[in-house]
Image (cartoon, rainbow, N blue to C red):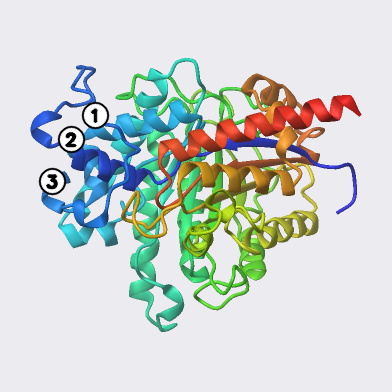
Amino acid sequence: MGGAPRQVHLTWLDGAVGTAVRAAANLCPPSDNSQTTDGVQGPKAPPLDQPHRQHELRAERYDEFNCVEALCLTRPLVVTQVHRAYIDAGARVVKTNTFCANRLQLAKFGLAHLVPDINRTAVTLVREAAASAQQHECWIAGSVGPTEILLSTIPADDNATRDAVRLAYEEQITALVDAGIDILLVETVCDLSTCLAALDAAEKVVRTHEAVDRRAAPTTNRLPASPPLVWAPSTGGSIRQLAVVVSFTPVAGGRSLVSGEPLAAAVAAVYDHPLARRKDHAVHDGGESGSPSTFYVIVGVGVNCGSGLRASALALSKADPAFAAASDGTFGLGAAFGTIRQSAENAVSRSGKRTLPLLLSCCPSAGLPTTFGGEGYVPPEIFAEAATLWLRSEGWLPAEATSAVAQRRQDCVDASDESASSVHILVGGCCGTAPNHIGAAVAAAAVAAAAAAVAGDAQ
């Protein structure tokens, strides 16, 4: 792509929120931690970074429904403390504990009727954790995971199933948007048809809310709204900013989805969706007040999960563990992220929307989905080394040296100028990534970035 080199901004995501919540709840029985979110100080939860074997996570110890999303209602203090641990570690984008909080998933536990309550409460818990860390500004990512139905396997004339999936996404996304998320993170996407159903639902939710100014979230939530998104232009308080990030989990060495589409084609399909092709985010009449009120929507893509880091750790654990996961410089993602990045660049170039920044995410796994520890577990120091080597190989380490929120916000004031040449990369973790993984990666990248800056000044 021609033009000036893109300016890079790095923001750290959190890790495996659901796994961390499950582990923390397992260590802190309900009888010792039954507080609600009314501000009453409860007992401190045990450390969240201890390795736990899968067989130690007994369902009766952490939730009677064996449903981690329900802990937003039954164990809110534990969930809030997990979010705060990731924030303290350096995460500035924090995911809600809602990965499987859709109707089709919750129905397995008889909890389908709680979809709105769980999702809205989950957003409130992240906002409370961020408010308690007053020295940091954070953004809330509403996590939307699979429904366990792959629409690519459903007959074309089975409209009932397709409608059920779309409506399940619409219900969950409505609750998250109503509660005031900054980012809609559709993650662990392995089926393109299902992904497009989620985007259809998101577009309908945006259109439904477009003429309503909900920037301050529901009136029942008295905590302050999130700060403006660093990758969006200065829009004023009348416009709601929302990023929609589709995070793929490819197979075949990162080349394709389970549904068979090449990863590059899947990325192109996301950017061809009407949600990504909104006409320059036009402002509409806000209603009775007469003030403009709409959504400024930006669509991004990324990759999450995968077994690359775990495979490296297993294969080389008896040799040089400090080098194991970092050996190929891909952060355990193989060719996946390179394909994501190039495909997104191509899509933005084809669309002619050079006035929009390029938004990417990268969240590899550090362990099995159900455990911190055990076979294939990647220690924080290896995760940090892999992250640093990957950032260096991408040429992105200097971004960390200038990633202060104030600086990034100033950079983005003139969207028609700066954002035309900017990349905003969200880096975090997926399965098995505890707060100390994020903390180690943030610290290691900062040290490496400072060294790179010094070396650059010396030249």
Q: Nearer the viewer, residue 160 or 400?
A: 400
Q: Residues within 10 Å of mark 2 (few under 14, many from 20)?
A: many
The residue under the point 49% across, 67% down is: 190
Residue 374 seen in the current view: yes
Tell which circle, 3 or 2, labels the residue nearer the N-terminal end.
2
Q: Amino acid at mark 1?
A: Ala
Residue 294 seen in the current view: no
Residue 39 relative to residue 339: left or right = left
Which quarter of the rendering shows the N terminus? bottom right
Q: Amino acid at mark 3?
A: Arg
Tell me the number on the disc at residue 45.
1
* Residues at marks 3 and 2, CA–CA distance in whole angstroms: 9 Å
Residue 86 relative to residue 374: left or right = right
* Residues at marks 1 and 2, CA–CA distance in whole angstroms: 6 Å
The residue under the point 65% across, 70% down is: 265
* Residues at marks 1 and 3, CA–CA distance in whole angstroms: 14 Å
Q: Secondary structure at mark 3?
A: helix
Residue 284 relative to residue 341: left or right = left
Q: Where in the figure is residue 453, as x and y percent of width and height?
A: 78, 28
Task: Name the residue that disc number 3 marks.
Answer: 61
Q: Where in the figure is residue 152, as x and y percent of width and height?
A: 46, 77
Question: Residue 410: which quarter of the image?
Answer: top right
Are discs 1 and 2 less than 8 Å apart at CB? yes
The residue under the point 33% across, 66% down is: 164
Task: Name the residue that disc number 2 marks.
Answer: 28
Q: Secondary structure at mark 1?
A: loop
Q: Amino acid at mark 2?
A: Cys
Residue 433 relative to residue 448: left or right = left
The residue under the point 25% across, 38% down is: 24
Q: Where in the figure is residue 313, as x and y percent of width and height?
A: 50, 58
